[in-house]
Image: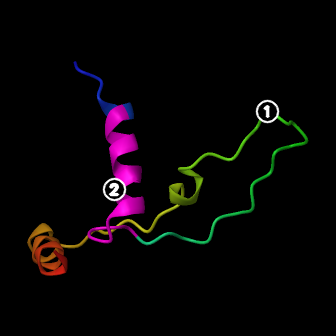
Amino acid sequence: DGGIGGCMLLLSVWSWERLPVGRPKTVKYEDWDDKDDPLRFLTWAYKWDVLNETTDDPLVMYKLYTSEM
């Protein structure tokens, strides 16, 4: 059991920020509430917290991604 979830999440967020291909659509997110705690900083991945998930046919999505490339 490898446990590569953290690295894959970081790679996903990086690719969504840098590459326009295959990027999920973000949903309007709430303004950050630091709850008056100066140590609760907004993270880089916060805007990718709420996404529209696609449940389309993988073959259709593959063709879409390759055409975007």
Relative image position of residue 13 (x, y in whole percent): 41, 51
How many numbered markers are drawn?
A: 2
Q: Secondary structure at mark 2?
A: helix
Q: Quadrant of the C terminus?
A: bottom left
Work out whether residue 66 or residue 49 is closer to the camera in this orientation and state it. 66
Main secondary structure found in the magenta portion: helix
Picture disc at residue 15? 2
Comparing 57 with 68, the one in front is: 68
Q: What residue appears at the point 91 percent right and 41 percent down from the top-left corner?
A: 36
- Taking 3 as reference, is 10 above or below it? below
Q: Position of residue 55 (x, y in %)?
A: 28, 68
Q: Residues within 10 Å of mark 1 (few under 14, many from 20)?
A: few
Q: Which residues are magenta?
A: 7-24
Which residue type carries mark 2? Ser
Q: Position of residue 37 (x, y in %)?
A: 87, 36
How far, Cα to Cα, is label 1 from label 2?
27 Å
Give the residue furthest to the right: 36
| Mark 1 lies on residue | 39
Q: Amino acid at mark 1?
A: Leu
Rendering coords of residue 23 (x, y %): 34, 67
| Residue 54 drawn in magenta | no
> Mark 2 packing: few (<14 Cα in 10 Å), some, or many (20+)?
some
